[in-house]
């Protein structure tokens, strides 16, 4: 979406293993010159592990990288995640990892990843977030098998309702990450990344009609600033730039039963990433083990009026083919796919 003026509807699912675009639709609207200086931030997620409980030949255990304007955030870090990062081209220059709970398939990879980062003579601090117990469990994990970690690792316990700021570092730019409750036992949580509002739609014709020449002044107007023309007149953004538009919302559930907490957190989400460990035939088992079926995840997406749903954390029986899960979910919510390792999804603006 780099260079898009925000009204394009391009949606692509790039499969990094084959480099094929799985889906593309709605070409960008006719060109407008101001695109050249108003660039929207790129936002994408890459699935590093999509298997529940244990790795399979096809799928590693949970981890997902989110990349926004060159910044990488990691959600979960199952065993072997660092190798998946190398395989799928995810940067090691990350400074935050978010954990939803502390079942082994979601965090064991942090032991090796922190060690590798230490070997790389990293000096930047790393911040790890997780529900109650994070300090203890992750604190033990990162000290396992190493004399000392040569960079600072801060561990923060989070709870539902928290908004994770950047602790005054000024590193988080243009979005917030909020924590919501999920139903998987032990105070499990999910995370929602919500971008701040962005400027309204710029109308080049109106700018021209007001006598503002194409160029840097258009960029200022787009930001809502009043500009001064060469003849001394001033022109405000009002009437040339529309109302502010919402940013994107990406919601990552981790392991959970379908629940109201997720429905609330995912209201209008551009992308809902929901676990779907089982198919309908094992819906009782899903209930017993604190997981969701594909259909239940789809019902959550429908209730939340999400734009699209990606299912992950699938049982080993769906490792090779998750067609059954896709079919069951799409009967409820059409815009559903099942993730596989290496899948990257770009998340465009909805308008
Ligand atoms: Zn799990
Ligand atoms: Zn779990």
Image (spheres, rainbow, N blue to C red):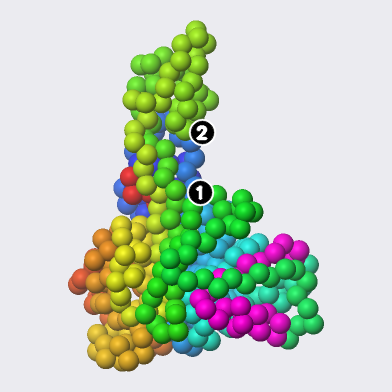
Element class at badge 2: loop
- Distance from label 1 to label 2 (Cα)? 18 Å
Query: In this rendering, is residue 300 above or below 226?
Result: below
Is there a contact, CB below 8 Å, between mark 1 and mark 2?
no
State left or right for residue 311 relative to residue 222: left
Q: Position of residue 305 (x, y in %)?
A: 26, 61
Answer left or right for 219 relative to 296.
right
Give the camera-side residue of 264 and 314.
Answer: 264
Q: Compare marks 1 and 2 and give the one earlier in the sequence.
A: 2
The residue drawn where x is 52% and y is 71% is 158
Q: Secondary structure at mark 1?
A: loop
| Residue linked to disc 1 | 174
Image location of residue 108, percent across then percent down: 59, 83
Residue found 55% across the figure and 49% down from its top: 173
Residue plotted at (45% across, 84% down): 186
> Which of the 4 image quarters holds residue 309?
bottom left
In this rendering, the answer to whether 324 lies above or below 235 is: below
Is residue 253 magenta-colored?
no
In magenta, the rendered stretch is 122-144
The residue that label 2 is drawn on is 37
Q: Nearer the viewer, mark 1 or mark 2?
A: 1
Could you say which is closer to the camera, residue 172 or residue 282? 172
Q: Is residue 213 above or below residue 56?
A: above
Q: Residue at x 30, y 75 (%)?
A: 259
Is residue 94 depicted above or below 81 in this figure? above
Q: Residue furthest top?
A: 231
- Is residue 127 a member of the stretch shown in magenta? yes
- Spot occupied by residue 65 in the image (x, y as percentages of width and height): 52, 66
Q: Is residue 50 visible?
A: no
Q: Quadrant of the C terminus?
A: top left
Residue 181 vs residue 211, the one in the foreground: 181
Image location (x, y in percent) of residue 273: 39, 68
């Amino acid at each position: 979406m780099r260079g898009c003026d925000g009204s394009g509807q391009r949606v692509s699912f790039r499969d990094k293993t084959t480099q094929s675009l799985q889906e593309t639709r709605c070409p960008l609207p006719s060109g407008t010159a101001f695109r050249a200086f108003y660039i929207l931030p790129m936002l994408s997620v890459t699935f590093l592990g999509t298997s529940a409980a244990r790795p399979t030949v096809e799928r590693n255990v949970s981890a997902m990288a989110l990349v926004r304007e060159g910044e990488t955030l990691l959600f979960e870090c199952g065993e072997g995640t660092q190798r998946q990062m190398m395989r799928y081209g995810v940067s090691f220059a990350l400074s935050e990892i978010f954990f939803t709970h502390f079942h082994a398939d979601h965090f064991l990879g942090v032991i090796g990843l922190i060690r590798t980062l230490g070997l790389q003579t990293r000096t930047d601090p790393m911040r790890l977030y997780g529900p109650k117990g994070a300090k203890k469990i992750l604190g033990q994990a990162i000290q396992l098998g190493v004399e000392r970690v040569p960079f600072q690792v801060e561990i923060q316990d989070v709870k539902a309702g928290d908004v994770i700021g950047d602790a005054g570092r000024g590193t988080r730019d243009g979005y917030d990450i909020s924590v919501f409750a999920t139903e998987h036992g032990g105070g499990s949580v999910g995370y929602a990344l919500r971008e701040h509002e962005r400027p309204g739609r710029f109308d080049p014709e109106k700018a021209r009609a007001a006598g503002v020449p194409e160029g840097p002044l258009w960029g200022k107007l787009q930001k809502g600033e009043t500009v001064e023309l060469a003849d001394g007149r001033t022109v405000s953004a009002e009437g040339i730039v529309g109302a502010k538009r919402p940013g994107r919302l990406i919601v990552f559930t981790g392991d959970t039963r379908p629940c109201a907490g997720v429905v609330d957190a995912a209201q209008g989400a551009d992308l809902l990433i929901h676990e779907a460990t089982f198919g309908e035939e094992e819906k009782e088992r899903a209930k017993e083990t604190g997981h969701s079926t594909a259909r239940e995840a789809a019902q959550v997406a429908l209730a939340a009026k999400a734009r699209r749903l990606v299912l992950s954390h699938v049982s080993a029986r769906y490792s090779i083919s998750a067609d059954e899960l896709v079919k069951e979910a799409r009967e409820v919510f059409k815009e559903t796919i099942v993730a596989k390792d290496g899948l990257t999804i770009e998340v465009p603006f909805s308008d």
